């Protein structure tokens, strides 16, 4: 088991105290539990609650912490003696409490005595959620609106986790560095790979070798138009583009999230290069605008305008860029938002719905070009966001009769057909907002056309 350092224990205590400064009631946060894959002893790996990790620092299973006035009480059962046969000697409850700087430790059965007037965050796993609901005798649903002190707790945690402390940033740098290494490995094996799975294997091998795991299901595909493609059986053929969206997660749960797109032959076709340069222009303009006080929504709209302008210059769209964005024509090819928060979750705190992503009082738009915007806040120093513009030819969008009718004269469909070898392109980096501007934590992974081609052709 990972052992927190003394400096990390100090950080955990500081986080608890900062929470105590924001709320005047106790809170209990459950870690979560494993679930069986098919029979009870064969379980999926545990991914502890990120809120639990933020204050406790260890990915404990079947545990809970009670936070009150800056103090932490740990509730966890000692391992059964028989478990040593299968899992080796495990630390005792008291030893674990010492590792995380807990003020007291109790068996889980005693948790029921500490539930009066406590707030909580709904767990993402069904077993723990059921336990929460029964013990607290109130209805809690993940990603559904909270109320009362549960809502107050969620808002307080958002307040803390939006701005990363030094310990968090150090972990995020580690995740970014390993993510960069993984992508370079993927690019280098592409020319010899026969199917997507071989590239995925090379990338995830790097992550595993650093004793990390992936922060989400890897996307490694020649079908880049499928935004969350988790199939890896497609053959890699000359003329294809390969889109890889892969991120490392540290032992403590902090995430990296990077996308690169490259030609499997090592050389972009003229049409692939043209679209890539459009996406790259949107990417670079977005990062150049990042600084404290800037609205993330404005960065998204800047990227939309850059993509619309680029596609108009290529003859795919007709009209002025600003007008095209106003009518959501760009969203035919760039339907998602420019990015999201990044931290302990790859889409940080989205288990709380839009509480973290949207400034209080703001609601999601129902516009085609804005409905998938995940972050709508002014940027602050210490926030980590992704910037990930893209271009996709999604059949479900482009063949939709309503869209075909609405944009019949806006899209030059005949010209678009000349770009059939571009299914999907995305360029994504992890960007830390600094006191004056920004820092790209994943800048060590090249993304210009020539640099990407060089990595693929010169493994």
Image (cartoon, rainbow, N blue to C red):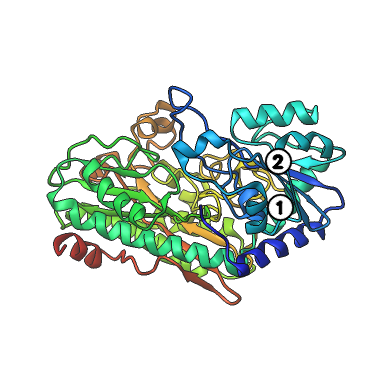
Q: CA distance from mark 1 to mark 2?
A: 10 Å
* Residue 213 visible within the image: yes
Can see residue 381? Answer: no
Secondary structure type for disc 2: loop
Residue with the most extreme bottom position: 436
Query: What residue sits 47% from the left and 66% below the top?
Result: 173
Determine which quarter of the picture holds residue 10.
bottom right
Which quadrant of the rendered structure holds the C terminus? bottom left
Q: Is residue 408 left or right of residue 345?
A: left
Task: Name the one closer to the observer, 414 or 11.
Answer: 11
Q: Position of residue 225 (x, y in %)?
A: 33, 40
Q: Where residue 62 is drawn, which disc sits there?
A: none
Q: Residue furthest top?
A: 39
Task: From the viewer's perspective, tell me whether residue 408 is left or right of residue 438.
Answer: left
Q: Who is closer to the viewer here, 353 or 213? A: 213
- Does dot 1 land on a helix, a strand or a loop? helix
* Residue underneath mark 2: 121
Question: Residue 114's x, y, as percent?
Answer: 83, 40
Q: Nearer the viewer, residue 360 or 82?
A: 82
At label 1, counting other C-alpha atoms closer than 10 Å, the crowd grade (few under 14, some 14-19, many 20 or more) is: many
Left-right relation of 314 to 380:
left
Residue drawn at (63%, 42%), measured in percent from left and top?
A: 31
The residue closer to the viewer here, 22 or 65, is 65
Tell me what residue is drawn at x 83 percent, y 56 percent: 69
Vertical placement of residue 78 versus 378, above or below: above
Could you tell me if the residues under marks 1 and 2 are in contact, i.e. CB atoms within 8 Å? yes
Name the residue beneath numbered marker 1: 157
């Amino acid at each position: 088991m990972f052992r927190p350092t003394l400096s990390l224990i100090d950080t955990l205590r500081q986080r608890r105290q900062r929470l105590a400064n924001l709320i005047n009631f106790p809170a209990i946060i459950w870690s979560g539990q494993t679930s069986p894959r098919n029979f009870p002893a064969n379980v999926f790996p545990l991914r502890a609650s990120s809120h639990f990790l933020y204050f406790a620092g260890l990915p404990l299973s079947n545990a809970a912490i009670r936070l009150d006035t800056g103090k932490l009480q740990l509730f966890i059962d000692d391992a059964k003696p028989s478990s040593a046969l299968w899992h080796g000697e495990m630390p005792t409850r008291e030893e674990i409490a010492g590792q995380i700087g807990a003020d007291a430790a109790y068996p889980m059965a005693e948790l029921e005595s500490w539930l009066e007037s406590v707030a909580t965050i709904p767990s993402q796993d069904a077993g723990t959620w059921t336990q929460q609901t029964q013990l607290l005798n109130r209805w809690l649903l993940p990603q559904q609106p909270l109320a009362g002190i549960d809502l107050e707790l969620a808002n307080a945690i958002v307040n803390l986790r939006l701005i990363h402390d030094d310990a968090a940033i150090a972990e995020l740098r580690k995740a970014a560095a390993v993510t960069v290494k993984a992508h370079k490995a993927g690019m280098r094996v592409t020319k010899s790979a026969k199917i997507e799975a071989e590239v995925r294997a090379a990338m995830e091998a790097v992550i595993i070798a650093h004793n990390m795991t992936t922060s989400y299901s890897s996307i490694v595909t020649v079908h880049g138009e499928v935004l969350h493609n988790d199939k890896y059986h497609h053959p890699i053929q000359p003329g294809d583009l390969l889109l890889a969206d892969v991120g490392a997660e540290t032992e403590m749960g902090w995430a990296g999230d990077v996308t690169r797109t490259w030609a499997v032959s090592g050389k972009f076709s003229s049409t692939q290069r043209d679209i890539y340069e459009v996406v790259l222009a949107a990417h670079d303009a977005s990062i150049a605008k990042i600084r404290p006080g800037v609205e993330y929504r404005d960065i998204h709209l800047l990227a939309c305008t850059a993509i619309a302008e680029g596609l108009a210059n290529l003859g795919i769209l007709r009209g002025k860029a600003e007008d095209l964005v106003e009518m959501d024509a760009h969203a035919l090819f760039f339907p998602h938002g420019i990015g999201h928060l990044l931290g302990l979750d790859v889409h940080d705190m989205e288990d709380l719905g839009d509480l973290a992503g949207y400034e209080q009082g703001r609601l999601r738009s129902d516009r085609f070009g804005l409905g998938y915007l995940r972050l709508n806040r002014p940027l602050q120093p210490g926030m980590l966001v992704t910037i990930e513009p893209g271009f996709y030819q999604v059949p479900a969008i482009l063949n939709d009769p309503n869209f075909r009718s609405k944009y019949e004269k806006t899209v030059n469909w005949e010209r678009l057909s000349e770009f059939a070898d571009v299914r999907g392109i995305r360029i994504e980096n992890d960007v830390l907002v600094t006191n004056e501007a920004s820092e790209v934590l994943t800048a060590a992974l090249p993304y210009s056309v020539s640099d990407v081609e060089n990595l693929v052709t010169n493994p």
